[in-house]
């Protein structure tokens, strides 16, 4: 139990240093509490996933059966990610994957500080809103090996 407590405290400290919002409750490899109380939509999550103006996750990831041309292969294939990761684990990876892997090339979608090459009009802003992240979590959580 003492080891788990130490890991939680360490990850909370890393999150704070990485510019993550201090109220995020990181436990192990997950953010257990949703970022907003508003209801998330898997349909909106799919739109964000493919949208060039928001998440544009398909730039690096593939989802079988998704109507999106030119899906990337840099990041993991996400067709059955709901079988592998819980919503809380997905949330942390979208918020700031560098909390788990400092060498990741995945951008932090919900970090405001310690960013590089940010246009001045976007300084201090997150890439995605809390609700957009929750929409993505809803969409990706439903991606399972039995999803058509």
Image (tube, rainbow, N blue to C red):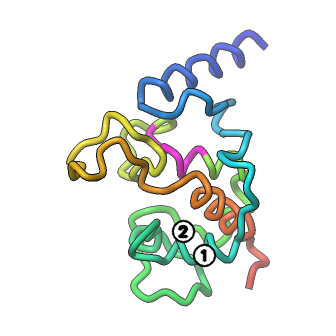
> Is 57 on the left-hand or right-hand side of 27?
left
**Prevalent SS, magenta region:** helix
The vertical placement of 102 against 66, above or below, is above
**Picture quadrant of residue 98:** top left
Q: Are marks 1 and 2 in contact (CB under 8 Å)?
A: no
Which stretch did the figure color magenta?
92-98
Which corner quadrant holds the C terminus? Answer: bottom right
Coordinates of residue 117 in the picture (x, y in percent): 20, 48
Find disc 1 in the rendering and name its residue. 46
Which corner quadrant holds the N terminus? Answer: top right
Coordinates of residue 21 in the picture (x, y in percent): 53, 33
Find disc 2 in the rendering and name its residue. 77
Q: Residues within 10 Å of mark 2 (few under 14, many from 20)?
A: some
The one nearer the camera, 42 or 100, is: 42
> Is 111 on the left-hand or right-hand side of 137?
left
Q: Residue at x 42, y 24 (%)?
A: 17
Q: Which label sits in the foreground, 1 or 2?
A: 1
Judging from the image, what secondary structure is the residue with disc 2 in? loop
Judging from the image, what secondary structure is the residue with disc 1 in? helix
Coordinates of residue 54 in the picture (x, y in percent): 44, 68
Residue 93 falls inside the magenta stretch: yes
Give the CA distance from mark 1 to mark 2: 15 Å
């Amino acid at each position: 139990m003492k080891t788990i407590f130490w890991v939680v405290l360490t990850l909370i400290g890393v999150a704070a240093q990485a510019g993550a919002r201090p109220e995020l409750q990181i436990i192990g490899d997950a953010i257990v509490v949703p970022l907003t109380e508003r209801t998330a939509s898997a349909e909106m999550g799919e739109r964000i996933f493919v949208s060039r103006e928001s998440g544009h996750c398909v730039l690096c990831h593939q989802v079988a059966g998704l109507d999106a041309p030119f899906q990337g292969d840099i990041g993991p294939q996400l067709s059955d990610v709901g079988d592998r990761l819980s919503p809380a684990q997905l949330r942390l990876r979208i918020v700031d994957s560098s909390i788990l892997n400092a060498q990741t090339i995945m951008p932090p979608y919900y970090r405001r500080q310690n960013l590089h090459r940010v246009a001045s009009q976007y300084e201090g802003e997150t890439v995605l809103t809390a609700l957009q992240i929750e929409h993505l979590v809803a969409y990706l959580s439903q991606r399972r090996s039995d999803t058509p």
